[in-house]
Image: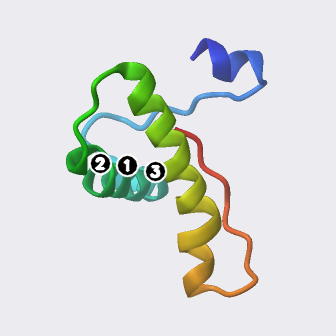
Amino acid sequence: MAWAQSHGIGHVLTPPGRPMQNGDIGSFNGKFRDKHLNEHWFESLDEARRAAVAWRQDYNRVRARSSLPQVQPRATSV
């Protein structure tokens, strides 16, 4: 939370048990878990972070454009 606050990003918390109120992040988290975290065994936290950056770049720049040519997707951060 400190990073977000230092960059002027506020937090809006979803009430427990109400994931449908934040479908975008729920969808992203599910894809990240299914397509990245569950498929790899990481030897260190640093290795996991590097792999997450590469996955996020692919998610934002390559994969999303393949279904909507020339449409820039919203950036996400991990």
Looking at the picture, which amino acid does disc 1 mark? Asn
Q: Position of residue 40 (x, y in %)?
A: 25, 44
Give SS at disc 3.
Answer: helix
Question: How far is mark 2 from mark 1, CA to CA?
Answer: 6 Å
Residue 30, percent across and down?
31, 54
Q: Quadrant of residue 53?
A: top right
Instruction: Give residue 70's position: percent from left, percent from top.
Output: 75, 83
**In the image, is 56 to the left or to the right of 7?**
left
Q: Amino acid at mark 3?
A: Ile
Please tell me which residue is depicted at 70% across the width and 18% down the height of the picture: 5
Q: Nearer the viewer, residue 74 or 66?
A: 66
Closer to the camera: disc 2 or disc 1?
2
Residue visible at 28% across and 31% down in the picture? 42
Kind of residue at disc 2: Arg
Q: Are marks 3 and 1 in contact (CB under 8 Å)?
A: yes
Q: Quadrant of the N terminus?
A: top right
Q: Is residue 16 above or below residue 32?
A: above
Which quadrant of the structure image shows residue 72? bottom right
Q: Residues within 10 Å of mark 3 (few under 14, many from 20)?
A: few
What secondary structure is found at the residue carrying circle 1? helix
| Horizontal arrangement in the rendering, residue 6 relative to residue 61 (left or right) | right
Per the rendering, the mark at residue 25 is 3
How many residues crowd around disc 1 within 10 Å: few (fewer than 14), some, or many (20 or more)? few
Q: Tell me the distance, in whole angstroms, between the alpha carbons under discs 3 and 2.
A: 12 Å
Q: What is the spatial separation of the Cα atoms under label 3 and label 1, in whole angstroms?
A: 6 Å
Residue indicated by mark 2: 33
Residue at which label 1 appears: 29
Q: Please state if 66 lies on the left or on the right of 27 as rendered.
A: right
